[in-house]
């Protein structure tokens, strides 16, 4: 979705997942993302830059240099965002979040991190399976996509058992974006046992599920997770659904949010959740 596609006038008016130059994998200035949000007619955004503790260097990350990837100076982050929040006040509500990379052994370290700062929203995402980020491809070498997907869902459940200081689980079927054949070996039905365990765990923890429109950007033809997963979350009693485009560039802010609103309604939701001060605020979807 480009900025030329016009303003959103209803539906989802807060993008709760976006990255800036504070993330290793983005070069976008914070201001460029905020200006794109204004151009799209958003009411609010939450900046959620990557903080992936103990993220190992992957083959293919040479351009990122020798410094540990996906870490940033949190003090500088807050100083920058607080200043811009004041500058945009009255035009756009700027919230301060973070996306943490879940690994089972990091529960205490993430607890200390997120409790040390006045964050509005914490996304918990699984970016590593046995130390491999699916983005770089090695996870899929020498085996069918289906096997890697099943392992990723099992790892997600394991991470939820080890880390609890987050608000919503990011892009549940993220792994499918990067499979050799993407969705050819994927459906909710095929992995229903594993996915249901993840959803039940989230609900028991009082955590939300993110619907991430980045899957549309990556050519999957569906958001992450698949609408069948969102519908199942609702059937199981899940109520907290958050929405983010996972934008790393300004032109992807609020990517396909019109379609996201339609999907949510088809899955049984008449509202979505935004976080402020680590508490969900529910908004009606007005199409």
Image: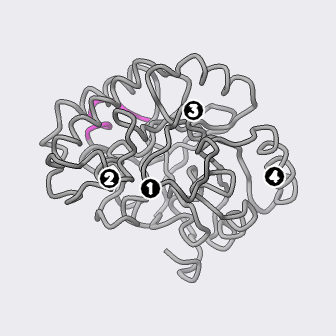
Instruction: Tell me the residue that label 1 is attached to.
Output: 60
Q: Name the residue rendered at 60%, 24% in the picture.
A: 110
Q: In the current view of this chain or complex, which residue is farthest to the bottom?
A: 4
Q: Kindly indicate whether the residue at mark 3 contacts the one at mark 2 (C-beta within 8 angstroms).
A: no
**Element at label 3:** loop
What is the magenta range?
A: 232-239
Q: Kindly indicate whether the residue at mark 2 contacts the one at mark 1 (C-beta within 8 angstroms).
A: yes
Looking at the rendering, which quadrant does residue 68 occupy? Answer: top right
Q: Name the residue rendered at 61%, 21% in the picture.
A: 109
**Element at label 1:** loop
Circle 4 or circle 3, nearest the eye? 3
Give residue 245's position: percent from left, percent from top: 50, 58
Q: Earlier in the sequence, mark 2 or mark 4?
A: 4
**Element at label 2:** loop
Q: Earlier in the sequence, mark 4 or mark 3?
A: 3
Side (left or right) of 95 relative to 4: right
Give residue 254's position: percent from left, percent from top: 54, 64
Mark 1 vs mark 4, CA separation in Å = 35 Å
Mark 2 vs mark 3, CA separation in Å = 21 Å
Looking at the rendering, which quadrant does residue 67 occupy? Answer: top right
Instruction: Tell me the residue that label 2 is attached to.
Output: 137
Mark 4 vs mark 3, CA separation in Å = 26 Å
Mark 2 vs mark 4, CA separation in Å = 38 Å
Mark 1 vs mark 2, CA separation in Å = 9 Å
Side (left or right) of 250 relative to 284: right
Quick one: 223 or 173, which is closer to the camera? 173
Q: Which mark is residue 85?
A: 4
Instruction: Tell me the residue that label 3 is attached to.
Output: 53
């Amino acid at each position: 979705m480009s900025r030329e596609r016009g303003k959103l006038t209803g539906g989802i008016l807060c993008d709760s997942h976006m990255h800036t130059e504070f993330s290793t994998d983005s070069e976008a200035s914070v201001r460029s993302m905020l200006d794109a949000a204004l151009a799209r007619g958003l009411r609010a955004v939450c900046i959620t830059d990557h903080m992936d503790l103990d993220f190992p260097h992957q083959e293919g990350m040479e351009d990122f240099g020798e410094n540990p990837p996906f870490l940033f100076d949190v003090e500088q982050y807050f100083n920058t965002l607080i200043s811009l929040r004041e500058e945009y006040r009255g035009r756009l509500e700027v919230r301060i979040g973070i996306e943490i990379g879940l690994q089972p052994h990091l529960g205490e370290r993430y607890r200390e991190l997120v409790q040390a700062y006045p964050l509005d929203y914490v996304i918990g995402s699984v970016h590593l399976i046995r130390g491999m980020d699916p983005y770089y491809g090695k996870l899929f070498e020498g085996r069918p996509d289906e096997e890697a997907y099943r392992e990723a869902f099992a790892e997600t459940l394991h991470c939820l058992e080890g880390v609890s200081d987050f608000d919503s689980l990011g892009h549940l079927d993220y792994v499918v974006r990067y499979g050799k054949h993407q969705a050819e070996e994927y459906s909710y039905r095929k992995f229903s046992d594993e996915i249901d365990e993840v959803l039940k765990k989230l609900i028991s923890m009082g955590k939300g599920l993110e619907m991430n429109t980045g899957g549309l950007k990556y050519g999957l033809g569906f958001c992450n997770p698949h609408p069948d997963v969102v519908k199942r979350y609702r059937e199981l009693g899940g109520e907290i659904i958050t929405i983010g485009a996972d934008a790393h560039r300004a032109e992807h802010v609020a990517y396909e949010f019109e379609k996201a609103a339609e999907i949510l309604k088809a899955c049984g939701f008449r509202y979505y959740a935004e976080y402020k001060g680590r508490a969900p605020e529910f908004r009606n979807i007005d199409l």
